[in-house]
Image (cartoon, grey):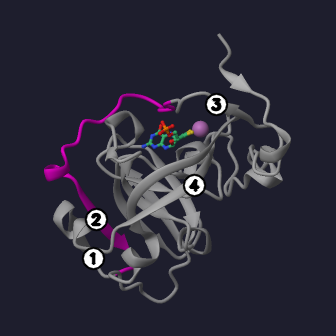
Amino acid sequence: MKYFEKPGADLADRVPPGQHLAKGFPVLTYGETPQVAAADWSLTITGLAEAQTLSWQDLMALPQQDFTADFHCVTTWSKLDVTWTGVAIADLMAQITLHPGATHVLMHCYGGYTTNLALADFVRPDNFLAHTLYGEPLPPDHGGPVRVVVPHLYAWKSAKWIQTLEFLAEEALGFWERNGYHRRGEPWAEERYSDLGF
Ligand SMILES: Nc1nc2c(c(=O)[nH]1)N[C@H]1C(S)=C(S)[C@@H](COP(=O)(O)O)O[C@H]1N2
Ligand SMILES: [Mo]
């Protein structure tokens, strides 16, 4: 059985260096898969922002969009044209009042995983909170009920089972970023491993 394909010439310009196309959509999780029902899910806004908690109903009341995005895992598989439904981060941010000096976000997930982004990487038109994958409720393995999708960076930034957005005045490293992976993780620049000297 062949699990990976070499990209054809037409797709080569969409597959970053060192990546191969995955067959299917692999699941990559560190640790257990949290089981969170949509009715029990909520998103807490904390740190340098007006504190608030959004429920599943609050999320559903925001504009819903279908979107298609490529997905690049640092372990070298990529999946092109994944189709999702969710809420644009830009529309979410329109509900959030940041305090002066907020420049970064640390995302906390059910189960304890964390990952960090500069606000410039978080608030981009192609970033979403996704709750639907290929027209079906996002399966728990893939981060359901709600995950973050950040297509322009390696997929470890696409936090599954998102629980809390903590806005910060400086960079704070998340789980993989403290464990040898790059603080930003841009796949076209192959920002795989930490440049912080640890
Ligand atoms: N909460 C949480 N989010 C996570 C992870 C994780 O272990 N826990 N793994 C990351 C990694 S390394 C990748 S490649 C993608 C995998 O998403 P998938 O399992 O839907 O393919 O989720 C990212 N988000
Ligand atoms: Mo990954």
Q: Nearer the viewer, mark 1 or mark 3?
A: 3
At 83% from the left and 43% from the top, the residue drawn is 17
Residue 107, compared with residue 182, is above or below; it is below
Q: Residue furthest top?
A: 1
- What residue appears at the point 57 percent right and 55 percent down from the top-left corner? 69
* Secondary structure type for disc 4: strand
Q: Do the residues labelled 1 and 2 touch (CB within 8 Å)?
A: yes
Disc 2 is placed on an element classified as strand
The spot of residue 135 in percent (x, y) is 35, 48
Q: What stretch is highlighted in magenta?
A: 27-49
Q: Mark 3 points at which residue?
A: 22
Q: Residues within 10 Å of mark 2 (few under 14, many from 20)?
A: some
| Residue at which label 1 appears | 51
User: Extreme front residue here?
Assistant: 10
Residue at numbered disc 4? 69
Q: Is residue 120 above or below residue 147?
A: below
Marks 4/1: CA distance?
30 Å
Q: Is residue 79 visible?
A: yes
Q: Rate crowding at label 3 as few (under 14), some (14 to 19) or many (20 or more) other CA atoms within 10 Å.
A: many
